[in-house]
Amino acid sequence: MRPLVLDVSRLLTGLRFAGPTGVETLELGLARHLPPGPGLALTPWGARKVAPATLARIADTAARRWREDESDVTGQLAGVAAFLAGREVPRPAPRPDASLLSAMRFAPSLLGRVTSLPTDSVTLHTGFFRLEQPALFDWKAKRRDIGMIVAFHDILPLTHPDWFRPGEAALHRARLVTALKLADAITVPAKAVRDDVAEFALEVGLKLPPLHVVNLPVAARFATATPMAADLPYMVIAGTIEPRKNHALLLEVWNRLGPDAPKLIIAGRRGWANDAVFSALDAKPANIMEAPGLSSGTLARLIKGAAALLSPSLDEGFGLPVAEALSAGTPVIAADTPVYRELWGSRTVLVGPQDVDAWVEAVRVPPPRGAGFVRTDWPTYVSALRAITGSV
């Protein structure tokens, strides 16, 4: 089986954040679950080989920064516990700064020639970071034995540019064009995303490499976590506070429910283009708390103890928090969108993402808890990726 060489560019730059995004969590998981071997970093100075020991150190640094291996998360949950009990929420302890300088410490280790990667290996790019710069792959002309797999999670910046930062649509388009031109295979998390990528390839007149639907993996901790203890019911929405996630709808739902609303924990950092939502949250609405920067272990306990996980997203490529909640046996109320209908329709309560009245009723009477359901675990995901290397 051909060795997989992981692109850890997104993992490196993600060190500046207190907690990982879904893509960064995926890249860290791959760094830990793939067989030991070299990696790849796309730097401003070109593509570089990452030695196995350096890749392991990058993964360990990210895990420490994001507290991924902490078993005692009581401190992280202290603020949430106080909020649920109606007490004053303590100020969180200051976290050490981690700017891009955190990644720069690895610069001296990123001097390896990318052309010295193992014979017949396959590079794996799951964060599509710097794929908009095709010149970073000019070295492949000298190493035609090396294959390339790109994981594309969605093309939403192209279909809904107003949900993203200015310029993101152009970047995403360039990344997808690079993938179509250079990749030997592209993986997507759902059939709906596969159809979107195929339609885009037709639109731009590019040959479509083999497309593989590979559902994203869920860490075992979500099934095994000890539930967050709470005297009052609470609900959780997980993910960056950005327009696509539709936090504005939940703010209106909680406003309508008034003092009868359950507690709502918003587990995610603030993003972009969402000033109205940020202003509303700054006003400290009743029964709503922001909890950014939680480790995966803390999030697992929080989701496990919730009356429901909410995902009113206007659209998604997969919906990892939904998968995590279902793994924990936590009920899910989610938006009625094509991807969610495809992947989770029979296991969740689906509600129109703009139907405030229906969301009010769904939140008022949440569904009962169910048995845990894991669509894809880490060994299954890695096996699927390694199987694809045999066809590239």
Image (cartoon, rainbow, N blue to C red):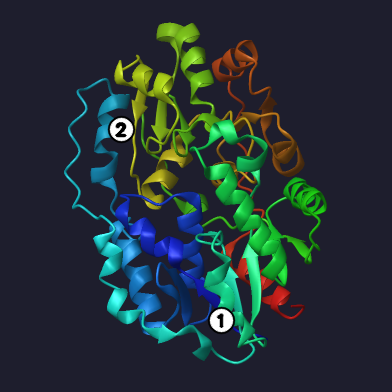
Is residue 24 among the parts visible in the rendering? Answer: yes
Closer to the camera: disc 2 or disc 1?
1
Q: Nearer the viewer, residue 233 or 88?
A: 88
Q: Is residue 163 above or below residue 362?
A: below
Amino acid type at image mark 1:
Trp
Identify the residue under disc 2: 80
Identify the residue under disc 1: 139
- Residue 197 coordinates in the image, percent (x, y): 74, 52
Q: Residue at x 46, y 17 (%)?
A: 251
Q: Residue at x 30, y 20 (%)?
A: 282
Amino acid type at image mark 2:
Val
Q: Is residue 237 above or below residue 174?
A: above
Q: Residue at x 74, y 81 (%)?
A: 390
> Are the residues flagged by discs 2 and 1 in contact, CB closer than 8 Å?
no
Quadrant of the frame with the C terminus: bottom right
Q: Nearer the viewer, residue 298 or 328?
A: 298
Query: Image quadrant of residue 46?
Result: bottom left
Q: Is residue 294 above or below residue 55?
A: above
Q: Nearer the viewer, residue 278 or 327?
A: 278
- Residue 218 coordinates in the image, percent (x, y): 56, 55
Quadrant of the frame with the N terminus: bottom right
